[in-house]
Image (spheres, helix red, strand yellow):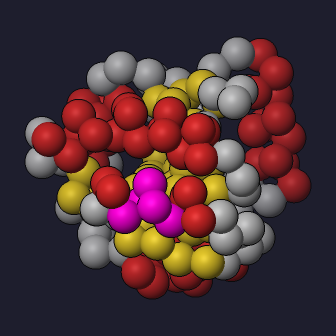
Amino acid sequence: MLTAVIRVGGSVEALAATFSVLIPAVADGFLGHAVVVDGIGKPDVERLADATGASYLRAGGAEGWHCGAAEARGDWLFLLEAGDVPQAHWAQAVERHLILAPDTPALIPLRGVAGSLRERAAMSFGPRRLRPGLIVPKGHALVGRLGSMPRRLSVKRERAEI
């Protein structure tokens, strides 16, 4: 089972945009759970998490991924920032990856040149660091680093500017 771990830095609207894309995967039975990790502690964020059935935690910074992983029910995690909107058919691409390469983390990269350049720069400074867009085994998130380089998937994600 896949769990989405979503870090929120403020905007409840950005979180709503991310949830709007994840809900069909829940209905299909592919995404079993979501954990919202709120770095600020806004009541609106907690209410939205509760309304969607997601778990809610207060934790900031890099420790957010670890706290979210500890709360996750699934064996695999999809790490997202609020406002991340994966393209259509993202669930099928992830499912295919988990069938074909079940021991390898994956990355749904940001769409566009600027996003791609930012992600590639981040990889050069910390290639095995946890970051948004990753699909990782829960154990990797609990220790805070990847066991191997992620495989870039063909689908992309965009960041809603809300």
Indicate yes or no whether the magenta region holds residue 49: yes
Give me the residue at 38% from left, 71% from top: 55
Closest to the observer: 99 or 35? 35
Spot occupied by residue 61 in the image (x, y as percentages of width and height): 76, 70
* Side of 5 where 44 appears, left or right: right
The residue at the far top in this view is 112
Q: Can residue 151 be seen in this view?
A: no
Instruction: Determine which quarter of the picture holds residue 7.
Output: bottom right
Q: Give the range drawn in magenta.
A: 46-50
| Above or below: residue 67 compared with residue 15 | below
> In terms of depth relative to the viewer, which is nearer, 49 or 71?
49
In the image, is 32 to the left or to the right of 70? left
Q: Main secondary structure of the magenta part?
A: helix
- In which image quadrant can residue 9 be found? bottom right
Rendered residue at 63%/20% (across/down): 111
x and y percentages locating residue 63 in the rendered image: 68, 78
Q: Please say whether residue 72 is one of the residues in the magenta stretch.
A: no
Direction left: furthest residue: 28
